[in-house]
Image: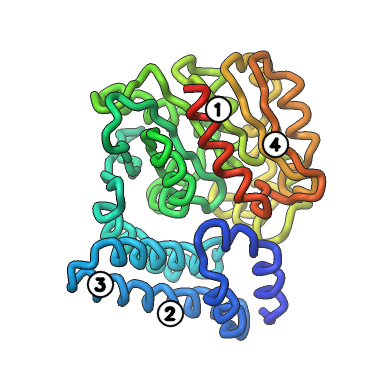
Amino acid sequence: MSKQRVESIIDQGVHRFLADGVHYRDLLDIRAAIPAWPQWPEVWSRFAAAAEGRGVDALAKSLTRTAATELARAALYYHYAQNLFYDDERIKRATHDRKVAAFARAAPLLDPPLERVEIAFDGIMLPGYLRVPRGVRKPACVILLGGLDTTKEDYLGVNDLCAARGLATLAFDGPGQGETLFRMRWRADFERSIAAVLDYLETRSEIDSARIGIIGRSTGGFYAPKIAALDARIRAAVAWGAMYHLRNLATIPEVTREGFVYVCGSRDVGAALEFFRCIDLEGFAGRITCPLMVVHGGLDTITPIDNAKRLMAEARGPVEALIWDDSGHCCHDRAHIVRPAMADFMLRRL
């Protein structure tokens, strides 16, 4: 594939890359260094390995803050090295494993540290990270739920914002996501994995299990409202890119469409479209009574603005909205406003 696809994906994702923590100069250099799409994982991985090397060197010198920063950066770059890359599952898996390993080294060095946890679900263990703020007795907890090829590791920026506000967090990989993808593909009953996370949080005495919220990003912008409708243990929810349905799957950007086909194990777009009929909030949105925040862009090509409007109209509890008509998917171009606002919403509502 040509350089054109590389340019298109970086143009489409530039605000997300920067918001998640990719350094601007690195992004410019990565863009220039990738000759064509097949080299996408290799070039991103080269920059990831450089950050990882700096982290290991800092750790050897007992410079733990620098080590934590560089190892977390390495994990993020490895994440993007395989993000939405489905051409070769062997490469995707190997790159993903390097991401997991780099973040595992960063997690205990961050402040506050992140504890790796495993949550039983239908014969496997869902991996996650629990983070408890220092000096707060029985804090409320926010579940951080990703979407298509969004994982517990690249949620660190929002995780930091929650921790700074005295909120505990639990970020996890559900079916078809992150580490879990290689053991269990996407499921029509994905929300059952969130219920398993809620069960797990009830066993953790450090947090107040009566005050649990959820932020769902992209496809998580469907499952966060759905679990809020189904489970009263959710006391506040954010639909970060509201996805009332996914009936437009056949017309979304190609690389994202390929991802949806891959994660559910379908053979083609038609089969994936049939599978993802499970994404539909009709009959559920009207059962949401907890506080709900909807974050959405009017130019979203993955989940159109009508999805957000319908969710807000049908939810029965208090609804807050952050919507820009000229913004795209998840409003990454307004990350400096959106991400702190979501953490503030959780602080106020929990």
Task: Kindly check if marks 4 and 1 are in contact, taking CB atoms under 8 A apart as contact.
Answer: no
Q: Is residue 17 left or right of residue 301?
A: left
In which quarter of the view is residue 112 placed?
top left
Q: Nearer the viewer, mark 2 or mark 4?
A: 4
Secondary structure found at label 4: strand
* 248 up-or-down from 208: above or below: below
Chain-order first, disc 1 or disc 3 = 3
Residue at mark 3: 58
Q: Is residue 225 left or right of residue 315?
A: left
Secondary structure found at label 1: strand
Chain-order first, disc 4 or disc 1 = 1
Secondary structure found at label 2: helix
Chain-order first, disc 2 or disc 1 = 2
Front residue of 317/311: it is: 317
Residue at mark 4: 322
> In the drawing, what numbered circle is on residue 237?
1
- Which quarter shows the N terminus? bottom right
Chain-order first, disc 3 or disc 2 = 2
